[in-house]
């Protein structure tokens, strides 16, 4: 099986369509969406509907913090993250809102545990940014049988953590398209990056594929029409900051 792992779509239809096409060309035959389908971007309706279609065809989908905010927008806006929640809510129909509301916070698929943020109390939306937070997330799934891999998003970065000979985790920065052996005698945690809003200075979309037959994980960067995605944000009246972020990748 080749499992495509896509997170933090952020209502960026241009990036999502590019990543889905790229994944299919790589032979992906299973799809998982790791939360934050909406928020920030100009196409929450279209992105949610597309993911719903994939879900109906067997894709795995979990909830992110922006999906939760879109269902129940905060009354007082105090963060950038909350600034587009009410607008997003108004773009979604009742069926789409019910879909987002009913999504689980985590799922297990064979040896893979899927979560948007940290597996350590997923509802608190903790970021996995270093060896310590990755270790906490991995420790939280020890009660789940057979878990070897934890996949998450939320941080908009692509990073791999693994447990070596000692008790501490090791951090590894992957290179796009380079297969990484992820043998089952170790425990692994990967942040798969963001499809819809990269923040590492590179505006190409991010996702990853796990090849369970070869025990390999490959991270990808995908070029897409970010200028059109950014212009759509401006046309929708969403703050300029979010359009600039797509153009700069920061």
Image: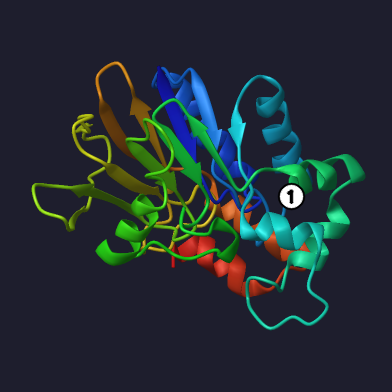
Q: In this view of the protein, can residue 28 be seen by the observer?
A: yes
User: Residue 193: image x %, image y %?
Assistant: 42, 51
Residue 176 falls in image quadrant: top left
Whether residue 149 is situated above or below residue 54 in the rendered picture: below
Badge 1 is on which residue?
Answer: 44
Quadrant housing the N terminus: top left
Q: Is residue 132 rendered to the left or right of residue 144?
A: left
Nearer to us in this view, 212 or 5: 212
Name of the residue lying farthest toward the right: 94
Nearer to us in this view, 189 or 220: 189
Quadrant housing the C terminus: bottom left
User: Residue 74: image x %, image y %?
Assistant: 78, 73
User: Residue 96: image x %, image y %?
Assistant: 82, 42
SS class of the residue under badge 1? helix
Q: Residue at x 85, y 53 (%)?
A: 91
Tell me which colouring the rendered structure shows.
rainbow
Nearer to us in this view, 228 or 205: 205
User: Residue 207: image x %, image y %?
Assistant: 42, 41
């Amino acid at each position: 099986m080749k499992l495509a792992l896509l997170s933090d779509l952020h209502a960026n239809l241009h990036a999502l369509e590019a990543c889905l096409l790229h994944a299919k060309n790589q032979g992906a035959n299973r799809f998982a969406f790791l939360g934050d389908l909406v928020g920030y971007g100009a196409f929450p309706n279209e992105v949610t509907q597309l993911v719903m279609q994939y879900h109906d065809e067997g894709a795995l989908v979990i909830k992110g913090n922006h999906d939760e905010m879109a269902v129940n927008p905060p009354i007082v806006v105090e963060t950038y993250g909350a600034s587009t929640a009410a607008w997003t809510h108004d773009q979604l129909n009742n069926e789409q809102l019910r879909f987002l509301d009913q999504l689980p916070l985590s799922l297990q698929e064979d040896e893979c545990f899927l979560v948007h943020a940290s597996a350590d109390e997923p509802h608190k939306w903790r970021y996995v940014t270093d060896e310590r937070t990755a270790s906490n997330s991995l420790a939280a799934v020890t009660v789940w049988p057979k878990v070897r891999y934890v996949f998450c998003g939320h941080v908009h970065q692509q990073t791999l953590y693994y447990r070596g000979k000692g008790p501490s985790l090791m951090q590894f920065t992957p290179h796009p398209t380079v297969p990484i052996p992820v043998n089952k005698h170790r425990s692994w945690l990967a942040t798969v990056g963001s499809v819809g809003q990269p923040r590492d200075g590179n505006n190409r979309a991010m996702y990853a594929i796990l090849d369970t037959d070869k025990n390999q994980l490959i991270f990808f960067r995908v070029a897409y029409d970010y200028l059109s995605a950014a212009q759509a944000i401006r046309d929708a009246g969403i703050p300029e900051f979010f359009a600039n972020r797509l153009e700069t990748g920061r």
